[in-house]
Image (cartoon, rainbow, N blue to C red):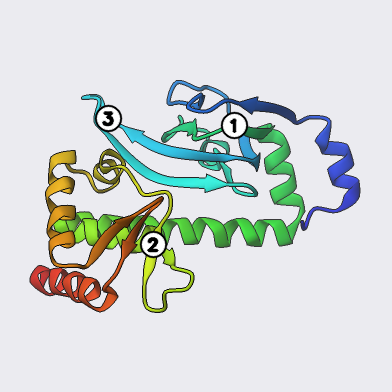
């Protein structure tokens, strides 16, 4: 939005566009390019995978967001794998174009710094959760983070479509069986419920109280 028309016209011919199908790998650790990828439409998942094969879902991105900027800035290897969650169209901007624009457009530079600062704060929060919270409290926090206000039900939130137990386990660094047990406990206590196409957080005060108790125990 902040790049002037002349720069866009001059630099756009150096970019490439490609469509990825559902579950197709867009970028992995072995990708030696330094391109920055912009999501034109679709959705991707950012995954950290360690040598033993275990995975942690770091985040998901949608239209208008971008990834790959870390390697473009520090010229080191890729820091994560990126996979298309469904059909996704990507614009790949060469490192040289990205750096030229960032260095030549102060407003773009400022916005990039704000985005990087926001991502750093988010990762710091996730790190604190993994360091100080028990698994069940990390799950409660993740459910709240993924949820959105439930239309027509004041005081409730929902996650639609409902997350799989495997995905939740990958996000908080635990096993699927642990997530299954804790979700069952939440259902018994009427804190969450499953409806057609959604996981509903029915009792937000109770859920927030459980999360607060988890942080209190960390003290």
Compared with 132, 78 (above or below) is above
Q: Residues within 10 Å of mark 3 (few under 14, many from 20)?
A: few
Relative to 205, 22 lies left or right: right
Q: Position of residue 154 (x, y in %)?
A: 41, 78
Where residue 15 sits, quadrant-wise, is top right
Where is mark 3, residue-wise?
50
Q: Secondary structure at mark 3?
A: loop
Point out the tag, 2 or 1, that comes first from the N-terminus.
1
Q: Residue at the spot x=85%, y=53% of the render?
A: 4
Q: CA distance from mark 1 to mark 3?
A: 26 Å
Residue hosting label 2: 158
Question: Front-most of 117 and 198?
Answer: 198
User: Could you tell me residue 76's position as x and y percent?
Assistant: 47, 32
Quadrant the N terminus occupies: bottom right
Give neighbour class at mark 2: few <14, some 14-19, many 20+ (Cα, 10 Å). Answer: many
Question: How many numbered circles does the render carry?
Answer: 3
Which residue position holds label 1? Answer: 87
Left or right of 85? Residue 168 is: left
Q: Going from the N terminus, do you reach mark 2 or mark 3 first?
A: 3
Q: Work out how far the residue at label 2 is from the one at label 3, CA to CA, in angstroms.
A: 31 Å
């Amino acid at each position: 939005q902040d790049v002037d028309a002349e720069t866009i016209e001059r630099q756009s011919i150096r970019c490439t566009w490609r469509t990825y199908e559902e579950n197709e790998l867009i970028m992995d650790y072995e990708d030696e390019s330094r391109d920055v990828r912009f999501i034109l439409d679709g959705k991707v998942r950012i995954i950290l995978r360690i040598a033993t094969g275990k995975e942690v879902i770091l985040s998901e991105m949608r239209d208008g967001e971008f990834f790959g900027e870390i390697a473009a800035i520090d010229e080191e290897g890729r820091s994560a794998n990126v996979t298309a969650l469904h059909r996704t169209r990507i614009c790949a901007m060469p490192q040289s174009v990205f750096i030229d624009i960032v260095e030549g457009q102060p407003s773009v530079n400022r916005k990039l710094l704000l985005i990087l600062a926001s991502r750093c704060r988010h990762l710091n929060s996730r790190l604190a959760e993994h360091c100080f919270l028990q698994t069940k409290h990390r799950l409660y926090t993740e459910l709240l983070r993924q949820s959105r206000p439930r239309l027509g039900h004041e005081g409730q939130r929902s996650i639609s479509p409902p997350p799989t137990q495997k995905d939740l386990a990958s996000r908080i660094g635990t096993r699927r069986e642990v997530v299954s047990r804790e979700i069952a406990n939440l259902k018994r206590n009427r804190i969450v419920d499953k409806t057609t196409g959604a996981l509903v957080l029915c009792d937000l005060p109770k859920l927030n109280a459980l999360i607060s108790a988890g942080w209190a125990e960390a003290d």
